[in-house]
Image (tube, helix red, strand yellow):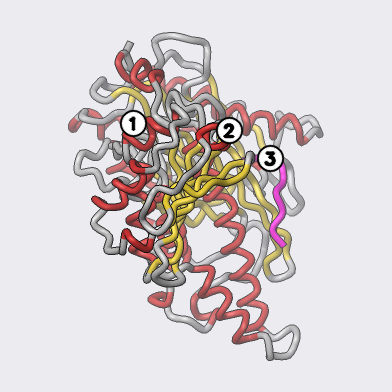
Amino acid sequence: MVNRVEGGILAAKGYSVASKRVGIKPKGENRDLTLIKSDVPAMVVGTFTRNAVKAAPVKWDMKVVAGGKASAIVVNTGIANAATGDEGLENCRREAEAAAKALGVERSHVLTMSTGVIGPQLPIEKIEQGIYDLSKCLVGVPYSGTAVLRQYFDGNKANAFMEASEAAKAIMTTDTIPKEIAVELELGGRTCHIGAMCKGSGMIHPNMGTMLGFMMSDICIDRELAQRMLRAIVERTFNMVSVDGDTSTNDTFVWLANGLAGNDEISADSLGIKLSDIDETGNEDIRDLAKRLTDRTSRLLDGSAEKSAAADFAELVEGLYTIMEFLAKTMASDGEGATRLFIAKVVGAPDYETAKTLAKAIITSSLTKAAIYGRDANCGRIFCAMGYSGAKFDPDKTDITMMSSEGSIKMIEQGKLPVFSEEEALRILSPDEVTAICDIHDGEFEATAWGCDLTHEYVTINADYRS
């Protein structure tokens, strides 16, 4: 069973973190540099922006991930290190070199990530000194079977977990809340943990994952299997989020697994499947594959290796979904200037791709988002967005129902506007989470997308972003 626990990125064994302000951001007192370390080189997989304009740290991290191992992550806010040419890449190398020297790890195992304003060069000397300073005050939780010294741990887990939460705040830009989560699960009879954090509020229309995201785990898993699992779940979580339709130059999401929980390695071979059985496009839900595997092994004797591996896979899939869906939904609800989370759920589709296309068209429609902000019961805007999405459906069979904690109201019935109470509609559209259920009555597939309303404040934030 997957359970939510405390700890953020320090919930898993073998990780430590520290963050501080070094003066990258021109204003404020918030921390702007974070250093994360794994006690041992961890398996690493990741997803990156498909924007043709890729920031220097994206190019650097793609090489690190291709190498398959990561020992540390350096994250700065304030400057994106994008559109910075060769000097930007050289600064990534200098960051990695500084971390490698301070921590005693391989330079090729250091990930560097940046978020903030596009164009300026990093104040690399400040960052190099900051990395050295942070390496001396990393905070982690002691665990059995390690000789790693936790000199800044005073016996209270809450202090370490607080530092993890501070790191989640330190990576924020225009975010209004930190985004972190951790889960506990059992794999092969061993208690394992996955902790994660991300940032993202504006320039959110992921075409791979989220703005910046980190998932730390202590499980043992084959790298090729992990990469396919990550891509498959990203497609149904982060890639179903949109705040403003802009795909960032810096989108990066990485998953580290250091194996310190001691479970037997999860691999395609142990599951009796081929890697190609996992649909990286997300068109087939990986949860359906997990269910087929557990159903196939349900008749095997208790304790058999194949049955245990299938159960572990299902548990891990549930854990990853719990984390990534939570982060995706939280990111959407914290969109720049947003006052409410807007969810579009399309059901009754002939295939997943149709449902996905329709759902994303709805949450990215500026007119629909403005109507959600104004609590305007104008479902014609949702209907219109569905019509220009490019997906094939019969408008004359379509129903649209708006739902919230205040109830539900049908606003399109069989392609026509029914009689409804404006007062009731206003009440239902007023809570801070509103859902549009769009049933096209043409099959059994469905998809959910997460967005937010479009407010005056969004324009205010982005009109003077650099200042």
Question: Which numbered circle lies on residue 7?
Answer: 3
The answer to which quarter of the image holds residue 85 is top left
Position of residue 33 in the picture relative to residue 163 (left or right) = left
Q: Is residue 198 visible?
A: yes
Q: Which residue is mark 1?
A: 94
Q: Residue at x 39, y 52 (%)?
A: 359
At which x and y percent is residue 429? 53, 35
Q: Nearer the viewer, residue 59 or 314?
A: 314
Q: CA distance from mark 2 to mark 1?
A: 55 Å
At which x and y percent is residue 446? 45, 63
Q: CA distance from mark 2 to mark 3?
A: 38 Å
Tell whether label 1 touches label 3 (CB within 8 Å). Answer: no
Q: Which residue is mark 2?
A: 427
Considering only order in the chain, which callout, 3 or 2, is on the residue closer to the N terminus? 3
The answer to which quarter of the image holds residue 106 is top left
Answer few, some or many: residues within 10 Å of disc 3's Cα (few below 14, many 20 plus, some between 14 and 19).
many
Which amino acid does the dot numbered 1 rest on? Arg
Tell whether label 1 touches label 2 (CB within 8 Å). Answer: no
Position of residue 91 in the picture relative to residue 438 (left or right) = left
Q: Is residue 95 visible?
A: no
Considering only order in the chain, which callout, 1 or 3, is on the residue closer to the N terminus? 3
Which amino acid does the dot numbered 2 rest on? Arg
Camera-side mark, 3 or 1: 3
Tell which residue pokes out farthest to the right in this image. Answer: 155
Magenta region: which residues? 1-9
Answer few, some or many: residues within 10 Å of disc 1's Cα (few below 14, many 20 plus, some between 14 and 19).
some
